[in-house]
Amino acid sequence: MTQRKYEKLVYEFKPEYNEAAAEGVGTDFVYSPQAYFRGACQIPGAKYNVGFQIFVKPFFLDRTPHRHPVEEYLIFLGGTFPNVFEFDADISLCLGEEMEEYIITKPTIVRIPAGVLHCPLNFKRVGKPIFFQAACMQGMFGGVYDGKEIYYNGPGQCVYDADKKCDACKNCLDDDWDR
């Protein structure tokens, strides 16, 4: 069968199961499987990546303040579908060099401009499931953590070597949809 012209622009979500959590912490804080769009490694040329998670109990998600070279959006909604406005949680997020704390208690979207320091992010209380989405406007998730540039492309296989797990080499970022 010949490849269709726009076939590379359509990606079927595949379930991702919790790969790891902090040492001594189980993975039952988030519903599994989860859905992620890992950007350029899944749709060549993509300049966007996003995770879709349902948090079902408290979890200190991101302890390390960091920054990205592009905008990021954090979306917090109720995870009891179809009413995403049914929200029962207390979530702490710090922004800026000053570590200004915001307590999220209702459906919220946070725009984090490129270069702005953010986190820790702590789901302190989860009374009802919470839908969380972190959308970063680059082809692979990553940024600067404690002065080091770190990227992560999930637990998937390398798009160039089916025998190898992705190691975030970033080669897929140079791919283009029409090749």
Image (spheres, rainbow, N blue to C red):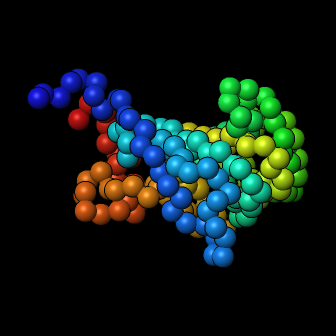
Taking the image as shown, residue 157 lies to the left or right of residue 114, namely: left
In the picture, the quarter occupied by the C terminus is top left
Q: What is the quadrant of residue 149 in the picture?
A: bottom right
Taking the image as shown, residue 69 lies to the left or right of residue 55, namely: left
> Would residue 151 be seen by someone viewing this image from the given angle?
no
* Residue 79, placed above or below residue 148: above
Residue 103, image x, y percentages: 88, 47
Residue 68, image x, y percentages: 62, 51
- What residue is shown at x 51% (from left), y 62% (from top)? 19
> Would residue 172 be seen by someone viewing this image from the given angle?
yes
Which one is in front, 118 or 109? 109
Residue 172, image x, y percentages: 35, 48
Q: What is the quadrant of residue 14 in the picture?
A: top left
Taking the image as shown, residue 92 lies to the left or right of residue 66, namely: right
Q: What is the quadrant of residue 67 in the picture?
A: bottom right
In the picture, the quarter occupied by the N terminus is top left
* Residue 111, placed above or below residue 62: above
* Residue 169, placed above or below residue 138: below
**Tally of numbered discs:** 0
- What residue is shown at x 56% (from left), y 51% (from top)? 32
In this view, the residue farthest toward the left is: 1
- What residue is shown at x 71% (from left), y 50% (from top)? 56
